[in-house]
Image (spheres, rainbow, N blue to C red):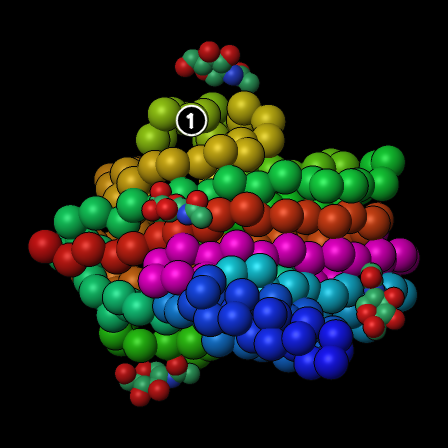
């Protein structure tokens, strides 16, 4: 009897929260859909090292999501092993010139991290000439990364071209370089870790159009946010991420 009563109580709790049960991804390329998002492990560079990683969906509702990832990776200190990330599936296919606002919130913390951890916490935003395009595809013109953290001396693609420019109330170093058939532009926090980020991403698009040669006719194709793990052990908690694309 006690066993069935406990199950029943759990079922009720699940209903009351109206949220997905926490689910943990363990497969290298497994994903789970939740509200507006897809959470994916994306262990694309795992072959350059040794280790494992698991990612857990904690809750999701509309354009907000909470998740965590835990990993241990060794070898190949300059190689990205994984980009565990959430992708916003709603609101893509808008030209940059037609964006009214793209409000975003990102609150995160390392619950644990090894000494000398090499990892970033980053947006990975993709634009291109056609309205649709998957990340890192033949439709990609620009990969726009925003690094809220970059630990252990890791560097983005290309070379640093601008030092300490102020955008959306924070200071950034800009890195630029070619990457397959697209160009990667990375804005790396010059203020250290930004663990409570609440801005309008339109400020970044306006800067990239005005100063970095990104055409305003480019379409927003993909917004992903997550962590590139290079080397070390960490448990990263994203207590709240949200992003909404509001066209004019
Ligand atoms: C990930 O999950 C697998 C399978 O449950 C486990 O063997 C591995 O130790 C986990 N990795 C981490 C970093 O927790
Ligand atoms: C590239 O864009 C075309 C035209 O919009 C679309 O049909 C195709 O699915 C896109 N390909 C990828 C890989 O996203
Ligand atoms: C960046 O510039 C701001 C002023 O805009 C200054 O307060 C800050 O110390 C600079 N940061 C670095 C790392 O140079
Ligand atoms: C997450 O942030 C969004 C935007 O600020 C907010 O609307 C939402 O209530 C937050 N969710 C949680 C669980 O704090």
Work out whether 71 lies above or below 206. below
* Total labels drawn: 1
Q: Quadrant of the C terminus?
A: bottom left
**Residue 149 quadrant:** top right
Give coordinates of residue 211: x percent, y percent: 30, 38
Q: Quadrant of ligand 1?
A: bottom right
Residues shaded magenta: 60-82
- Name the foreground residue: 60 vs 53: 60
Could you tell whether 114 is left or right of 99 in the image? right
**Residue visible at 25% across and 70% down in the picture:** 93
Q: Is residue 42 visible?
A: no
At horizontal 36% and vertical 25% (from top left) the residue drawn is: 169
Whether residue 59 is visible to the viewer of this picture, yes or no, is yes
Point 29% across, 45% down: residue: 103
Asked whether, in this view, residue 42 is left or right of residue 232, the answer is left
Q: How far across and down, in percent of the image, does residue 10 sit?
A: 61, 70
State which quarter of the image contains the N terminus.
Answer: bottom right
Task: State the residue position of label 1.
Answer: 170
**What residue appears at the point 73 percent right and 66 percent down from the top-left corner?**
54
Residue 170, picture quadrant: top left
Find out whether residue 89 is within the magenta segment: no
**In the image, the residue with mark 1 has its CB under 8 Å from the nearest atom of ligand 3:** no
Residue 110: image location, x then y, percent? 69, 40
Q: Residues within 10 Å of mark 1 (few under 14, many from 20)?
A: some
- The residue sitting at the left extreme is 248
Above or below residue 69? Residue 188 is above
Question: Considering depth in this image, is 245 or 152 the residue closer to the camera?
Answer: 245
Main SS of residues in magenta:
strand
Q: Vertical placement of 66 versus 161: above or below?
A: below
In the figure, residue 150 lies in which quadrant? top right
């Amino acid at each position: 009897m006690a066993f069935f009563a406990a199950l029943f109580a759990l079922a009720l709790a699940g209903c009351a929260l109206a949220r997905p049960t926490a689910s943990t991804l363990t497969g290298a390329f497994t994903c789970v859909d939740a509200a507006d998002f897809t959470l994916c492990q994306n262990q694309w560079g795992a072959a350059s090292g040794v280790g494992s990683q698991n990612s857990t969906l904690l809750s999701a509702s509309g354009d907000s999501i909470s998740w965590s990832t835990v990993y241990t990776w060794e070898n190949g200190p300059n190689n990205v092993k994984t980009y565990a990330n959430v992708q916003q599936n709603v609101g893509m296919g808008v030209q940059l010139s037609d964006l009214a606002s793209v409000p975003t919130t990102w609150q995160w913390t390392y619950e644990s991290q090894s000494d000398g951890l090499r990892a970033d916490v980053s947006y990975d935003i993709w634009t291109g000439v056609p309205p649709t395009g998957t990340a890192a595809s033949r439709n990609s013109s620009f990969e726009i990364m925003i690094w809220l953290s970059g630990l252990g001396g890791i560097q983005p693609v290309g070379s640093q071209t601008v030092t300490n420019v102020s955008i959306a109330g924070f200071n950034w170093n800009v890195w630029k370089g070619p990457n397959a058939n697209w160009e990667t532009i990375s804005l790396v926090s010059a203020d250290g870790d930004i663990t409570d980020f609440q801005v309008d991403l339109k400020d970044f698009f306006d800067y990239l159009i005005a100063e970095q040669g990104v055409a305003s006719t480019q379409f927003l194709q993909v917004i992903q946010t997550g962590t590139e793990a290079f080397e070390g052990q960490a448990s990263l908690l994203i207590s709240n991420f949200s992003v909404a694309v509001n066209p004019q």
